Amino acid sequence: MMIRSAHTGQMNLFSAANFRRVELDRREKLLKLFRNYVLHKKRIITSSRSEYYQRKPIRESLEVLERYLGLLPGYKLRGICRVIQVHEEDLRNILPTEENPSYQGSLEKLNQLIKLSHGYIS
């Protein structure tokens, strides 16, 4: 199987096994990023006394994303990417406030998650 490198544009010969391994590695990376992102935001939301985190849209978004923590391990890479893309607004809703020390790092992780989800299935 010939695969064009996204970085160099050169064609490389991949066996089906290598291609599958790359896809599994990408899948595991995306799952880990998603899981860590959602769990970190859950800790912030549930431990904060701020009224900001008690707002209904934030709580509902967290509930939706928490459901996927148990479901996504059964999904293929393309399915995980689609869930991230479809629920981008929910992922943004659970960002901490800009005053929170972890805001900038959270925003960077969110942008990485979204970028990877688009890059893996384009």
Image: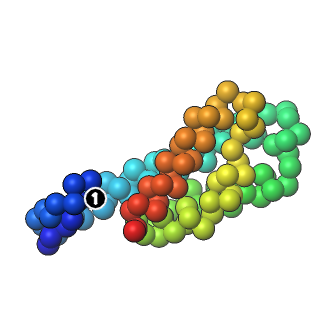
Give the residue at x 22% y 54%.
8
Give the residue at x 41% y 60%.
119
Q: Quadrant of the N terminus?
A: bottom left
Query: Regarding mark 1 in the picture, which secondary structure is present there?
Result: loop
The correct choice, above or below, for 110 with respect to 14 in the image is above
Give the residue at x 68% y 58%.
90
Q: Position of residue 41 (x, y in %)?
A: 66, 42
Q: Position of residue 111 (x, y in %)?
A: 54, 48
Q: Position of residue 60 (x, y in %)?
A: 77, 58
Give the residue at x 60% y 39%.
106
Residue sitting at the far front: 9
Which residue is the site of mark 1? Answer: 6
Q: Is residue 74 visible?
A: no
User: In front: 66, or 99?
Assistant: 99
Q: Position of residue 86 (x, y in %)?
A: 60, 68
Left or right of 115 in this view: 4: left
Left or right of 58 in this view: 10: left
Colouring? rainbow
The correct choice, above or below, for 121 with respect to 8 in the image is below
Residue sitting at the far top: 101
The correct choice, above or below, for 62 with respect to 4 in the image is above
Disc 1 marks a residue whose amino acid type is Ala
Left or right of 109 in this view: 66: right
Q: Is residue 107 visible?
A: yes
